[in-house]
Image: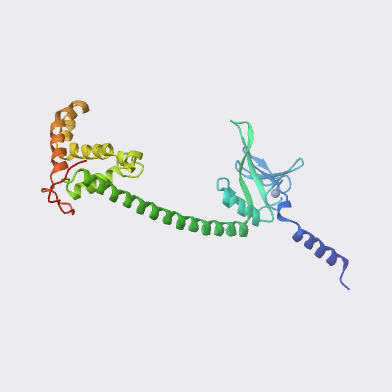
Amino acid sequence: MVPAWVVLTSFCERLISMAPKSSKPDDIVVFSILRESQCDECGAELGPGALLKKEGETALCLYCADLAHLVFLPQGNAALTRRASKYTTLRATIVRFSRSRKRYERQGILVEEPALQKAEADCLADADAREQRRLREAVRREEQDAAFVAEFVDALQRRYPGCPGAEATQIAGHACQKYSGRVGRSAAAKEFAPEAIDLAVAAHVRHRHTTYDALLAQGWERQAARAAVRDAVQAVLEDWSRSTTASTHKKTPSPNGDHIS
Ligand SMILES: [Zn+2]
């Protein structure tokens, strides 16, 4: 004959285990105290920052409240908090009174240690999956940009056949830089509008084939320096737009010479 208390205990345990997780009490509130206090049951001295549970008018330390086995999970990681809450049987919410805002603010939760470990493992697995996805997307973007730069180089060299290949690649690379807001990334450049290419090439020539940067370094105003090198820039652009002889790029020069349309 099984004693009645064993049947009752086992019945209660089954009831508890059958209870849906969502119905677990979430109303255990623990206060992170601002001023020194004392546990009403064991008399322990509690300093500022200590955790205290109130039961009616009674203040209890975590040991007396049977919450001392729980671990603290600070506020801030929503996924971890959600998962730890799902796995833990017992959970307490920690609040602290904000003197400046004059209200209680949530500091985090107390959960069972195995629950926190399980939640952390889940989140790590997720982070790994996210990282894999991020890498795949980055590679794809990299490829798209490489293709875009190559197309820009082609368009640039059709317009400026005399532009050395290395410089054409450099100009296209700068123009197409991600998030640069440079001309190459504009909608116009995607259609390879002549103006977009001209702007990119002119900027390159100004910096690399004239004294523009030196003038700026000497303290010239930008507009004055631009005006001073305008003819030099124009000369290089004209040279590049017709000549292929000085070019080092891979394209075979046309026997009839190249012309801009
Ligand atoms: Zn106590």
Left or right for 18, reference 148 = right
Q: Using the image as rendered, state which of residue 95 and residue 122 is in the foreground.
A: 122
> Residue 84's spot in the image, x, y percent?
62, 54
> Residue 140's spot in the image, x, y percent?
39, 54
Give the residue at the far front of this rendering: 256
Q: Using the image as rendered, state which of residue 131 and residue 161 is in the foreground.
A: 161
> Residue 51's spot in the image, x, y percent?
64, 45
Residue at 19 percent of width and 43 percent of height: 160
- Quadrant assignment, res 116: bottom right
Give the residue at the far bottom of this rendering: 1
- Quadrant assignment, res 186: top left
Left or right for 41, reference 108 = right
Residue at 38 percent of width and 55 percent of height: 139
> Residue 191's spot in the image, x, y percent?
33, 42
Left or right for 136, reference 219 = right
Q: Using the image as rendered, state which of residue 169 and residue 107 is in the foreground.
A: 169
Residue at 19 percent of width and 50 percent of height: 165
Task: Tell me the quadrant of the picture where the N terminus can be found.
Answer: bottom right
Snapshot colouring? rainbow
Q: How many marks?
A: 0
Left or right for 79, reference 224 = right
Residue at 13 percent of width and 36 percent of height: 235
- Quadrant assignment, res 177: top left
Q: Using the image as rendered, state which of residue 203 and residue 76 is in the foreground.
A: 203
Q: Is residue 76 above or below residue 12?
A: above
